[in-house]
Image (cartoon, coloured by chain):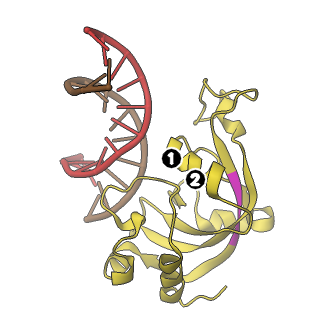
Chain colours: A yellow, B red, C brown
DNA sequence: GCCAACGTTGGC
DNA sequence: GCCAACGTTGGC
Protein backbone atom coordinates (compact mmCIF):
# COMPACT_ATOMS: atom_id res chain seq x y z
CA UNK A 1 0.00 0.00 0.00
CA UNK A 2 1.27 3.42 -0.98
CA UNK A 3 0.92 6.69 0.81
CA UNK A 4 2.55 10.06 0.57
CA UNK A 5 4.27 10.59 3.91
CA UNK A 6 3.42 14.29 3.81
CA UNK A 7 -0.23 13.37 4.09
CA UNK A 8 -0.01 10.11 6.08
CA UNK A 9 3.19 8.36 7.09
CA UNK A 10 4.12 5.17 8.91
CA UNK A 11 4.83 7.31 11.97
CA UNK A 12 1.27 8.60 11.80
CA UNK A 13 0.10 5.00 11.80
CA UNK A 14 2.37 4.24 14.77
CA UNK A 15 0.70 7.03 16.72
CA UNK A 16 -2.84 5.80 16.11
CA UNK A 17 -4.82 4.21 18.87
CA UNK A 18 -4.01 0.50 18.64
CA UNK A 19 -1.70 1.45 15.74
CA UNK A 20 -4.68 0.89 13.49
CA UNK A 21 -6.34 2.96 10.78
CA UNK A 22 -8.90 2.67 8.00
CA UNK A 23 -7.45 3.00 4.51
CA UNK A 24 -9.90 5.51 3.10
CA UNK A 25 -9.60 7.64 0.01
CA UNK A 26 -8.75 5.04 -2.62
CA UNK A 27 -10.66 6.07 -5.76
CA UNK A 28 -9.29 3.67 -8.33
CA UNK A 29 -11.28 0.60 -9.29
CA UNK A 30 -8.40 -1.83 -9.53
CA UNK A 31 -7.02 -0.79 -6.18
CA UNK A 32 -10.51 -0.97 -4.69
CA UNK A 33 -10.96 -4.48 -6.02
CA UNK A 34 -7.79 -5.68 -4.31
CA UNK A 35 -9.02 -4.33 -1.00
CA UNK A 36 -12.60 -5.48 -1.47
CA UNK A 37 -11.93 -8.94 -2.87
CA UNK A 38 -8.46 -10.07 -1.92
CA UNK A 39 -7.29 -8.60 1.37
CA UNK A 40 -8.17 -10.90 4.25
CA UNK A 41 -7.66 -10.66 7.99
CA UNK A 42 -4.08 -11.51 8.85
CA UNK A 43 -2.75 -10.66 5.39
CA UNK A 44 0.52 -8.74 5.55
CA UNK A 45 1.03 -5.43 3.82
CA UNK A 46 4.17 -3.61 2.72
CA UNK A 47 3.92 0.07 3.60
CA UNK A 48 5.37 2.34 0.92
CA UNK A 49 6.14 6.04 0.99
CA UNK A 50 5.61 7.55 -2.46
CA UNK A 51 6.62 11.08 -3.42
CA UNK A 52 9.34 10.83 -0.80
CA UNK A 53 13.07 11.30 -1.04
CA UNK A 54 13.82 8.60 -1.79
CA UNK A 55 10.55 6.70 -2.24
CA UNK A 56 10.85 3.79 0.20
CA UNK A 57 9.31 0.69 1.68
CA UNK A 58 9.22 1.56 5.34
CA UNK A 59 7.50 -1.27 7.16
CA UNK A 60 4.88 -3.99 7.43
CA UNK A 61 1.25 -3.77 8.45
CA UNK A 62 -1.49 -6.33 8.83
CA UNK A 63 -5.10 -6.41 7.69
CA UNK A 64 -7.29 -6.40 10.81
CA UNK A 65 -10.68 -5.64 9.28
CA UNK A 66 -11.86 -6.84 5.90
CA UNK A 67 -13.60 -4.81 3.24
CA UNK A 68 -16.34 -2.38 4.23
CA UNK A 69 -17.70 0.79 2.59
CA UNK A 70 -15.45 3.83 2.60
CA UNK A 71 -17.79 6.23 4.37
CA UNK A 72 -15.66 9.23 3.46
CA UNK A 73 -16.92 8.77 -0.11
CA UNK A 74 -20.36 10.21 0.73
CA UNK A 75 -19.06 12.95 3.01
CA UNK A 76 -19.47 16.17 1.04
CA UNK A 77 -16.75 17.84 3.05
CA UNK A 78 -14.21 15.13 2.42
CA UNK A 79 -11.54 15.70 -0.17
CA UNK A 80 -12.34 12.32 -1.73
CA UNK A 81 -16.10 12.90 -1.86
CA UNK A 82 -17.84 11.04 -4.70
CA UNK A 83 -21.49 11.97 -5.32
CA UNK A 84 -22.05 8.63 -7.03
CA UNK A 85 -21.34 6.74 -3.81
CA UNK A 86 -24.05 6.53 -1.16
CA UNK A 87 -24.60 4.53 2.06
CA UNK A 88 -27.32 2.59 0.20
CA UNK A 89 -25.10 1.91 -2.79
CA UNK A 90 -21.46 2.34 -1.83
CA UNK A 91 -18.97 2.49 -4.65
CA UNK A 92 -15.72 2.57 -2.69
CA UNK A 93 -14.39 0.14 -0.10
CA UNK A 94 -11.54 0.01 2.37
CA UNK A 95 -9.88 -2.21 4.96
CA UNK A 96 -8.35 -1.54 8.35
CA UNK A 97 -4.64 -2.08 8.80
CA UNK A 98 -2.50 -2.27 11.90
CA UNK A 99 1.19 -1.49 12.09
CA UNK A 100 3.19 -4.65 12.58
CA UNK A 101 6.76 -3.47 12.23
CA UNK A 102 8.50 -0.32 11.14
CA UNK A 103 11.77 -1.20 9.44
CA UNK A 104 14.90 -0.10 11.33
CA UNK A 105 16.09 1.37 8.03
CA UNK A 106 13.81 2.34 5.17
CA UNK A 107 14.45 0.48 1.91
CA UNK A 108 14.92 3.17 -0.71
CA UNK A 109 13.85 2.71 -4.29
CA UNK A 110 17.37 3.06 -5.76
CA UNK A 111 18.54 0.24 -3.50
CA UNK A 112 15.57 -1.93 -4.44
CA UNK A 113 16.17 -1.32 -8.13
CA UNK A 114 19.48 -3.16 -7.78
CA UNK A 115 17.89 -6.29 -6.36
CA UNK A 116 17.45 -8.92 -9.04
CA UNK A 117 14.77 -10.84 -7.16
CA UNK A 118 12.58 -7.74 -7.34
CA UNK A 119 12.98 -7.01 -11.02
CA UNK A 120 9.45 -8.20 -11.79
CA UNK A 121 7.83 -6.51 -8.80
CA UNK A 122 4.86 -4.37 -9.84
CA UNK A 123 6.00 -1.58 -7.55
CA UNK A 124 9.28 -1.26 -9.40
CA UNK A 125 7.75 -1.13 -12.85
CA UNK A 126 8.00 2.23 -14.54
CA UNK A 127 4.67 3.98 -14.55
CA UNK A 128 3.21 1.73 -11.85
CA UNK A 129 0.57 3.92 -10.21
CA UNK A 130 -1.67 1.48 -8.39
CA UNK A 131 -1.87 2.54 -4.75
CA UNK A 132 -2.90 -0.94 -3.65
CA UNK A 133 -1.17 -3.76 -5.46
CA UNK A 134 -0.31 -7.43 -4.98
CA UNK A 135 3.08 -8.66 -3.80
CA UNK A 136 4.31 -12.21 -4.31
CA UNK A 137 5.57 -14.25 -1.39
CA UNK A 138 9.02 -14.33 -2.90
CA UNK A 139 9.08 -10.56 -3.19
CA UNK A 140 7.73 -10.13 0.30
CA UNK A 141 10.33 -12.44 1.80
CA UNK A 142 13.08 -10.70 -0.15
CA UNK A 143 12.01 -7.36 1.26
CA UNK A 144 11.98 -8.66 4.84
CA UNK A 145 15.44 -10.09 4.38
CA UNK A 146 16.78 -6.81 2.99
CA UNK A 147 15.26 -5.00 5.94
CA UNK A 148 16.83 -7.53 8.36
CA UNK A 149 13.44 -8.01 9.90
CA UNK A 150 11.65 -11.10 11.13
CA UNK A 151 8.01 -11.03 12.11
C1' DG B 1 9.08 21.63 -12.27
C1' DC B 2 9.00 18.19 -15.93
C1' DC B 3 6.96 14.58 -18.04
C1' DA B 4 5.81 9.54 -18.87
C1' DA B 5 2.36 6.54 -17.93
C1' DC B 6 -1.45 5.82 -16.87
C1' DG B 7 -7.21 6.11 -15.88
C1' DT B 8 -11.48 8.59 -16.84
C1' DT B 9 -14.76 11.33 -19.40
C1' DG B 10 -17.57 12.44 -23.04
C1' DG B 11 -18.44 13.60 -27.99
C1' DC B 12 -19.32 11.21 -31.97
C1' DG C 1 -17.09 1.26 -29.33
C1' DC C 2 -13.45 4.56 -30.48
C1' DC C 3 -10.43 7.91 -29.18
C1' DA C 4 -9.01 12.72 -28.09
C1' DA C 5 -8.78 15.57 -24.31
C1' DC C 6 -8.03 15.93 -19.81
C1' DG C 7 -6.68 14.95 -14.98
C1' DT C 8 -3.68 12.38 -11.82
C1' DT C 9 0.26 9.80 -10.07
C1' DG C 10 4.71 9.69 -8.89
C1' DG C 11 9.75 9.16 -10.22
C1' DC C 12 13.34 12.02 -11.23
Q: Is residue A4 visible?
A: yes
Is A34 positioned to the left or the right of A13 in the image? left
Q: Quadrant of the C terminus of chain A?
A: bottom right
- Circle 1 packing at 10 Å, graded few (<14), some (14-19), many (20+), is some
Q: Is residue A101 above or below residue A67?
A: below
Which residue is at 52% across, 57% downward? A3
Instruction: Tell me which segment is drawn in magenta.
Output: A95-99
User: Circle 1 is placed at which residue position?
Assistant: A30
Is residue A145 placed above or below A85 in the rendered structure?
below
Q: Is residue A81 above or below residue A133?
A: above
Image check: A129 left or right of A92?
Answer: left
Marks 1/2: CA–CA distance: 7 Å
Q: Are marks 1 and 2 in contact (CB under 8 Å)?
A: yes
**Residue with the mark numbered 2:** A34
Residue ID at (52%, 77%): A140
Residue at (53% x, 83% y) in the render: A141
Let me know if marks 1 and 2 both belong to one chain.
Answer: yes
* Element carrying mark 2: helix
- Relative to the observer, which residue lies in front, C5 or A11? C5
Residue A134 percent coordinates (x, y): 51, 63
> x and y percent of residue B1 in the render?
23, 46
Amino acid sequence: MKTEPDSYSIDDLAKEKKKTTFWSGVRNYQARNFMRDDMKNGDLVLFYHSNADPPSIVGVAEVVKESYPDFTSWDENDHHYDPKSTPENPRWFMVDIKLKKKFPEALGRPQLADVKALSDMELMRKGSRLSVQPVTKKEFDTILKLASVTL
